Structures are given as C-alpha cells and as structure tokens.
Amino acid sequence: MIILKDGSSTTNLKGLPASAPLILNALEKSKIRYEYNDLKELSFEVKMRDRIIENSRWLNNSAATFSAFASSSFNPYYWIKTMSGYRLRPGKRPSAAIRDVFENPYLYSFECVTTVVLLYYKSILDTIRPEYFDRLYSPMLIWGHNYNDAMHMETYEGVDNIPGDVHYFYNPDYGDPIWMGENAVYLGPDQYFGHGIGIVTHDKMIEALNTLRKVNATKSAYLLNQTTRLNFSELYKYS
C-alpha cells in the first residue's frame, strides 16, 4: 500500500507518464507498506520506474546483442575493456557514455546482468540532472555486478510484482554458464524483458531457459523468490 506521510492523496498527482496507473495500482494493492514523505517523492519513483520499463522496451527492439564477456563489445570511443569490465575513458562524461549505449546500440554486446545495470544507469540519467549524474558515477566501471554504489541497487527476498522491478529466473541445469539464469525486468502483468530472450510471459521465459539446459537435464528453470530494485528514496535526494 502507498503511505504518504504528509497526508496528501495520490489523486493530486500530476504530469505522470502513461504507465503511471499500472505502477500506482501495483503499489497500492501490495501488502507491503511503501512510504513516501510527499507526492514529489512518489512521483519521482513512478517516473523512474516508467523509464526502466520504456528503456527495456527500447533495448529489446535495438541492435544491441547478447554475449559473454569474452566476445562482448562496448564503443571504444568511450570505453576501455579491462579484466574487470569496461572502464570509462579519462575525460569522457558518464552521462554521454550511457546515452551512447542507447544511441549506438549496434556497437554494444553484453549479458543480462550488465543489461540491468545499463538500464538502471539510463533510467537514473533520464530522471535526475546530467551534472548530478556525472558527479555521482565518475569514475565508471561496468560489467556484471561491477557498478557504482551510488546506484543504490538492492535485492530483497520476495516477489511483489511492481512494474520496473527486476526478477531472476534460475536455470539450475544450465549448459553454458551464461544461461545459468536470466535477469528480467517486470514490465507489467505476465510480461518480462530478458536480454537475449526478449519480451515474453513467465511461462515462455521458463520454456526458453529450458531449451538452454545441459544434455539429459532433469530440473526446470524457475522464478526465484527475490526482487532487485533501486532504492528510489536514496536517489530522490539527487533529483
């Protein structure tokens, strides 16, 4: 449920994106208490969740491809490939480098964890001032779980199905380690985006991962009881 500490009402929210009713309805119907100081803080979260959803849809239709680190690629104009991931070149702005992923996606190839990190960076950039973004996320190193602590990405036990959350489909009998599972953005009722698989339903995600198991596999892929999301209240401080 939504708790507004100043006693205001969500009916007074203005200027929200088209996905707002879906997001607000999910927050309101949840058994978890989602507390906000005021409408501005709630609006900030709704707008950032919307950007996560829209950036996911955009990336799904883009020329960015799926790959393991060994065969991955980032635009060398902005990024230097190191053993730990892609490091932003000295003198380049984090905001410009993140925008480049979405402006020149054909120059990029990465796996699903990195996808989530890039989606979060882009959605934060879409919601806060670029100069704040550049200060917060410099220096920048990206690959897998390498990201700046100021992103405030957190993982919780339980699945609450709030659009913009990230869920994990685990594939215990995987063949190639890159398909041990899929980090998927929850877009709305029974709709998930997983880089390398696409926008599919829960059952189709399981079906896709089951085709990527080892020979004579006996265990099906399944959705883990966990949720990854941004700490929106922390990020709101930079808005």
Image (cartoon, rainbow, N blue to C red):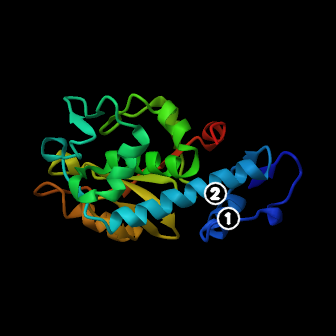
Tell me what residue is drawn at x 26 percent, y 38 percent.
79
Q: In the drawing, does residue 25 fall left or right of residue 74?
A: right
Q: In the drawing, does residue 224 fall left or right of residue 221?
A: right
Residue 9 vs residue 80, the one in the foreground:
80
- Determine which residue is flagged by label 1: 16
Q: Give coordinates of residue 137: x percent, y percent.
A: 45, 33
Q: In the drawing, does residue 16 fall left or right of residue 64?
A: right
Q: Give coordinates of residue 167: x percent, y percent.
A: 44, 53
Q: Which mark is residue 223?
A: none
Q: Give coordinates of residue 182: x percent, y percent.
A: 32, 53
Q: The disc labelled 1 sits on which kind of residue? A: Leu
Quarter of the image where the N terminus is located: bottom right
- Tell me if label 2 and label 1 are in contact, CB under 8 Å: yes
Tell me what residue is drawn at x 44 percent, y 60 percent.
55
Q: Bin the neighbour count of mark 1 within 10 Å (Cα to Cα): few under 14, some 14-19, many 20 and up.
A: few
> Which SS class for mark 2?
helix
**First along the sequence among labels 2 and 1:** 1
**Residue 37, can we see it?**
yes
Quarter of the image where the C terminus is located: top right
Q: Nearer the viewer, mark 2 or mark 1?
A: 1
207 above or below 237? below
Q: Give coordinates of residue 219: x percent, y percent.
A: 25, 55
> Which SS class for mark 1?
loop
- Determine which residue is flagged by label 2: 46
Tell me what residue is drawn at x 83 percent, y 63 percent.
12
